[in-house]
Amino acid sequence: GGLAWTTPELTPLVPTVPLPNGRQVALPAQLAPLAALFDAGQCAVVANVGPLVVPTDRTSFSAKSVPLPPKLFSHNDQQSVWQASVPEGAKFGWGGRIGDLLASQNTTQIFTCNSLTGSAVFLSGQTVQPFQIDPAQGSIPFGALSAGSLYGSAAGAAALQATLTRTRTHLFENDLRGVNQRSIDSNTALAAALAMAPTLATAFPAGNTLATQLAMVAKIISVSAELGAKRQVFMVSLGGFDTHSGQDTT
């Protein structure tokens, strides 16, 4: 039905450790360039991922004879289960937990967990916090401060920054002050580091949102030493799979 490839269209992979029962794996034509990375030990395939608890078929699902993931058919909850193993409301995700373990190796911990796709629980840890990055420009500065002036006034920009970063006596206000200061400092550091990044040799396709995110990830990895980050977790995403009634055409 158009959902399978013929053998000549596939590029076989040869794992270092043979798969059980003589099983074989291969890549479709669109992913064939990854085969060279796989053979060089620079790319891994994580198979059989998902929120299912045990092997489940239609009969066992209908009979509820096997344990099932929580809150099935809820879009938001299933995204959270994938990212954190807990339905919506989870505090910590897989990437954040990894970041908690790796952050001590980084001089600057703010760049441990990095999101190129907005806010997501996947990168939230007990100690590390996700740092959001713009896929096109990298750093996301305060708009009124980035040009060095506010409506043409340098004094106005300075006054705004002083207001945003002034120590407060109220607990919540002072916590927001810390967030503001961290954002200003980290984005200044990221912008300075990216200015030294080499030009990417790989030509990424224009108009491809995933490619744009991965290109920025490559740039940030190239300046990881300048950022004081030896170990990092990145999150990118590709949407469009929630097809609803358009599944047969999309």
Image: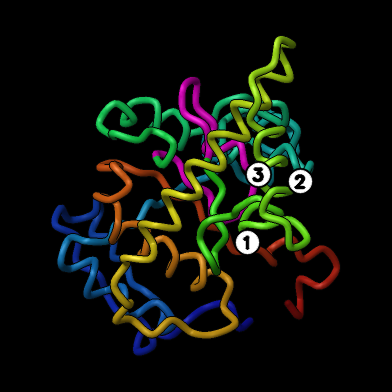
Q: Amino acid at mark 3?
A: Ala
Circle 1 Cα neighbour tier, 10 Å, few/some/many (<14 / 14–19 / ≥20): few
Kindly state the secondary structure of the residue where label 1 is placed: loop
**Residue 208 is drawn in which quadrant?**
bottom right
Against 9, residue 178 (above or below) is above
**Residue 198 is drawn in which quadrant?**
bottom left
Which numbered disc, 3 or 2, marks the residue that appears first in the sequence? 2
Regarding residue 120, the answer to whether it shows in the image is yes
- From the image, tell me which residue sits under label 2: 75
Viewer-nearest residue: 3 or 158: 158
Kindly state the secondary structure of the residue where label 3 is placed: helix
Which numbered disc, 2 or 1, marks the residue that appears first in the sequence? 2
* Residue in the picture at 66% in, 34% down: 162
Label 2 and label 1: CA atoms lie apart by 40 Å
**Residue 41 is drawn in which quadrant?**
bottom left
- Find the magenta span and give its range: 112-130
The image's mark for residue 158 is: 3
- From the image, tell me which residue sits under label 1: 147
Q: Amino acid at mark 2?
A: His
